[in-house]
Each structure stands twice: as structure tokens, then as C-alpha cells.
Amino acid sequence: MSRRTISFGVSLLLMNCAGTLYLFSSYGQALQQKRQLTQTYLNLIASCGSFGQSLSGPVWGHFSDANDRRNMCTLAGLFIFTGYILLAYGFAYDSIPTFSLPIAYLLVGMGSSGILTVTLSTCSKNFNSRNHGIATGLPMAAFGLSAFLFTMLIQRFFMDEEKAMDYFGFLLCVGMVAGGGAVLGSRFLFDCSLLSNSGGSLVDEDARVATRTVYAENGRISEDDGGGLRENENAQLLARSRRGSRSTVAAGTLGNTDARPLYLKKEAWILFLSFLIVSGCGLMYINNLGAVVIAMTVDSSESIQGIQQYHVGLLSICNCMGRFVNAFTSDFLSARFRVSRIWGFLFGVGLVGLGYGIGTSIDTVVADTLSGLVRITILIGVGYGFVFGSITALITNWFGVEKSGSHIGMFQFGPAIGGYIFNLLFGVYMDVAKKGETECRGSNCFQDAFRACFASCGLVVILLCGWQCSFLVMQTN
């Protein structure tokens, strides 16, 4: 078995270890009740996880581009382990100060970011950019599936017949499994792009062609493959047919040939702003799903914990499905019909917006609110998967793979900012709706926050569609 195959298989396991932030809704409300926290403070803890994951992204990206990625992944695993151990003891013992809870979740987020950035950067460099949809999409699908796998672990080992859950033991287990798994798996994460063609290299010609951009200008073809300018006897013919234009070989890119920093590129800012808004909307639902379930089970005799675990698992499966489907369809449509990957991103935005649209009037749209909540979870889960499944391939295809770790890290600022804004918005709305009570029941607890997300998704669609063909209708991806 080749080292590249081993590395790719390990990347799927590593991403399962990195996706544990999506578990927050399965124990967040219990943490709130145990430590007597407000919804706003609980959302601050959730936002710290997003901050840790996103704000540390550029740092992880920089060091992963310049250093051994395996060491970076090991360090990230230790962060996850430490964070969950501290969170478990903060949950179980009141003597642990509450300010340690955001710090613990910040460490979890930083570890998650390290594994995510290092793994995606390695996969993007190990494979031809024509296959980046699959090469990065499948690891992202594993990232989304993480919450479902750990939810199954809850039901098997940490929940008794009366549906009472051992949260302390569960958090300790997550820390040991996710953190320890990342430390062990990092030893098998190989960067095959560093090997030469002699001596058993895994870098084929396609991998070199994928990063080669050809220009037809003034009768000369210049190839950006690290070897400088080369004359080609067919340059004159190509120049006549495409004089003054740019074409790409194999996968092609939008921004590979632009030497400006990422923050000076217009297309980067438009994509970043769109990602910020949609990821913030998705994180608001993911982090507050437990509170939404409690609000909607006012007349239900079912176990609230059981319903919460069901929705967390369903959200994880749908998230994984969205990323998985996008991984294959984006590569196929791009190679066969030259359809831009941005359409997969927009499709995801539409699904998230539709989910929130149903949620704004759930009492009138469906007769059974709990079944209506299932539809919302499916739509937002699949849509969120499409968004995150598209973003990595868009970044590497448009801005190149040479600094893919740094670029992916920079884009992780989006979920941090967006998640904080929308989580804070949800917390404020729910605390106001409680009117001094310990719990809030009814759809009025979250409908205003859902309306804000619905409008925000509509804004993203308008923003992207308004950017004309320079963003949406591209010849290559």
C-alpha cells in the first residue's frame, strides 16, 4: 500500500477526532443546569470553541507549511486531550471556576483547528487539483460524521436504561479517544509532495500539471511550475487563437498567478464574507440545538436527552452526507461540464436558508413541531455540509496549493467571527424570552434569531449572484 493511500486513510480518522466540537449540543444544556449558567454565557463557551478553531487557523497553517505536519498534528491532539479533561472536571466539580470552561473549550477548538488545517493541507498537496473535491471533501465528510460516531458511543456506554447520562465519563472518553487518536495517527500522515520522482516517488505527472498555469501572450507560453519560462514551438498557434487571454491546463485556478497577498484579492474577500455569514448561521444551530429541542418539547413525554442525542446524530449524518455528495459531484461537474464549484457552495447556502425559513414559522408550517424540527435539522445539516465541502476546494483551486495551509487557516477566521455574532444573537434573544424563568418553552424563544439567519442567507445569495461572471461563471475551477 502506497504512503499516499495510507496518509489519506489516516486523514479520515484524524478528521473524526477533529470534529468533536459538533457534540456541544449533546451536553451543553446539562452543563448550563449543572453550573447554573445563563444561555448567553453558555453560548460564550460555545463561541470560544469556534474562536479557538478559527483564530488559530492562520498560525497552524503557517507552521504546517513551514514545518513537519506530523508534529503539528501531535500538538493539536494534546490540545484536544487537555481541553476535554479540563471540561470534564469543570462539569463535575463546582470548585472548578466557571471561567475555566471557556478556556477548556478554547483548547478543544485550537486542537480541532490544528488537525483540520494540517490534514486538509496535506491532502491538497498529495493529490491533483482536479481531484481536490474528493481529496478534501471526504476528509471534511469524516469531520462532519464525528458527532454521530460519538453520539453512538454515548448511547452504548454512557446512557442507562432511564436515559440518564454520565457526562463526566463521556467527556473524559472523548478527550482520550480524540486526543490520543490524533497523537497516534499523526505519525502516519505523510506529505508525499516532498518526494522526488526517483526512488519510489508518489508524485505523478498529473500532480505537477495540476499546479502548472499556461499563458498565451505575445507568442510565448510561460509555465508556472517552478522552472521559469519555456519556449514552445506551438506557442504561435495558441497565441493566435487565444491572444491576450489566459487558459489553464488540467484543473486550473483563479488566483494562482496573482502574486498579491490573499487579503488584497477582491474574490478572496467576497468568498470570505460569504463563508463568515453562512458558517455563523450554521454554528448557531449546531451549538444551540439542545436549547431548541428543549423549547420545542413543551408537550412531549419523550426523554429530552434522547431527543437531543437523536438530533445531534441526525445533524452529523446530514452534515457528512452533504460533504460527501459535494465531493463527488463537484469534481464530476467541474471536469465534465466545467461547472464552477461555487454552485455547490450556493446550493448549501440555499438549503441552510430554507431550513431557517421553515423555522421562522414552524408553528404554522407543520402540525407536529418536533417532526418539523427534524426537517430543519436535515436541511441545515446537508446545507452546512455542502458549504464546508466546497470551501476548501475553492480555496486551493483559486489561490493555489503552495500556501494552502496558510490560506485555509486564514479562512477559518470566518466561522470564529460569524459563530460568535450569531451565537451571541441567539443567547440574547433566548435570555430575553425566558423572562426570568430557568427555561424557555415555545418557538418564540428562537424565532427572531432564525429570522436573522434566514435574512443573512438571502444576503449571501444576493452578494454572490451580484458578482457577475467573474465569480460564478468561470471557465475552470
Image (cartoon, rainbow, N blue to C red):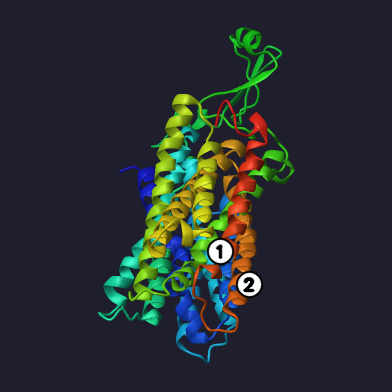
The amino acid type of the residue labelled 2 equals Val
Tell me, yes or no, whether the two marked residues, 1 and 2, touch with CB atoms within 8 Å: no
Q: State which quarter of the image contains the N terminus.
A: top left
300, 345: nearer the viewer: 300
Residue 312 image offset from top left, x and y in percent: 40, 64
Q: Is residue 354 left or right of residue 325?
A: right
Residue 250 image offset from top left, x and y in percent: 50, 26
Q: Residue at x 63, y 66 (%)?
A: 425
The amino acid type of the residue labelled 1 equals Gln
Helix, strand or loop at mark 1: helix
Which mark, residue 428?
2
Q: Is residue 128 above or below residue 315?
A: above
Q: Residue at x 64, y 41 (%)?
A: 462
Q: Residue at x 56, y 29 (%)?
A: 252
Q: Is residue 72 left or right of residue 178?
A: right
Comes first in the chain, label 1 or label 2: 2
Q: Is residue 162 above or below residue 320?
A: below
Q: CA distance from mark 1 to mark 2?
A: 12 Å
Determine which quarter of the picture holds residue 2: top left
Residue at image mark 1:
447
Residue most toward the left? 161
Q: Is residue 158 left or right of residue 76?
A: left
Residue 264 visible in rendering: yes
- At label 1, counting other C-alpha atoms closer than 10 Å, the crowd grade (few under 14, some 14-19, many 20 or more) is many
Residue 57 visible in rendering: no
Q: Residue at x 57, y 57 (%)?
A: 281
Residue 417 image offset from top left, x and y in percent: 65, 60
Residue 20 image offset from top left, x and y in percent: 44, 65
- At label 2, counting other C-alpha atoms closer than 10 Å, the crowd grade (few under 14, some 14-19, many 20 or more) is some
Helix, strand or loop at mark 2: helix
